[in-house]
Amino acid sequence: MTGTGTLVLAGTPIGDTADAPPRLAAELERADVIAAEDTRRLRRLTQALGVHTTGRTVSYFEGNESARTPELVEELAQGARVLLVTDAGMPSVSDPGYRLVAAAVERGLRVTAVPGPSAVLTALALSGLPVDRFCFEGFLPRKAGERLGRLREVAGERRTLVYFEAPHRLTATLEAMTEVFGAERRAAVCRELTKTYEEVRRGGLGELAVWAAEGVRGEITIVVEGAPEAGPAGLDDAELVRRVRDREEAGERRKEAIAAVAAEAGLPKRQVFDAVVAAKNAERNGPK
């Protein structure tokens, strides 16, 4: 190493402060510098843990992460023990921290961690969905078109998917997931994990979208079942078209029906769409 300092990534409780790892208190007291996403939340946490800090506290959040990283790296290079904490969970997991870790690694500085509670793993374990293979997708884009595009990228993903979402965007996200993955794809919406009003709502994406429209509050983690391992054998274009029409007759919009059939069959939506268009063209240009 080119320096003697150490960067410590410290996991903090995602709700109940009693979940704080024992080492967290010791590291808070030991740190020369504490970089906190929200210094007010840090103050409440130290009070709850009965911790007295002696190190300097600085803010480190999305707005100043790029500018403050070089400063913290220099302190590490000079031998400081820098503790990084975010509002909840593990730094750098959909929170500030990645830039600092990358910069410290590039300089050959030591990076270690105090493991703590994880909303990703907690929601996954509570979801009732397969946990042997999963991928974390973080927050989806806020714009509708970009959100749909990101979901389409993983439409055929067979691993369980985990997302974070803001409560005011939950309905739009579940509706977009319904459109891309299908209304029957199983999912779980985990709200306020480890807190007083913890709730896990399980069901099909379509059902969950209707529920969310009534209004949902709190910190949200969404867990979605992966795509089927393989589509049903022998699904030719005619069968794909029939399934789409069955769903349309049941009241689904064509776009949703195509997405659902594609998900069921483990096929790209474009393939099902092309089959439907070809069938309509054949009917329009039928025998004369």
Image (cartoon, grey):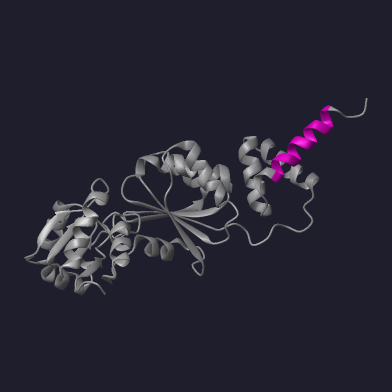
Q: Quadrant of residue 167?
A: top left
22 w.r.t. 237: above or below? below
Can residue 168 be seen by looking at this rendering? yes
Rendering coords of residue 247 (x, y %): 67, 41
Q: Specify the quadrant that holds the N terminus.
A: bottom left
Can residue 90 be seen by looking at this rendering? no
Foreground of the two, 64 or 76? 76
Magenta region:
271-284
199 w.r.t. 176: above or below? below
Q: Residue at x 24, y 57 (%)?
A: 86
Residue 175 is left or right of residue 216, and the answer is: right
Foreground of the two, 224 or 203? 224
Q: Which residue is drawn at 22% across and 61% down?
A: 73
For residue 242: magenta? no
Rendering coords of residue 40 (x, y %): 14, 52
Residue 35 is left or right of residue 194, and the answer is: left
Rendering coords of residue 211 (x, y %): 44, 43
Rendering coords of residue 57 (x, y %): 12, 58
Residue 238 is left or right of residue 200, and the answer is: right
Count the marks: how many? 0
Magenta span: predominant SS is: helix
Q: Which residue is drawn at 43% across and 63% down?
A: 124
259 w.r.t. 14: above or below? above
Foreground of the two, 284 or 27? 27
Q: Specify the quadrant that holds the C terminus.
A: top right
For residue 278: magenta? yes
Foreground of the two, 234 or 108? 108
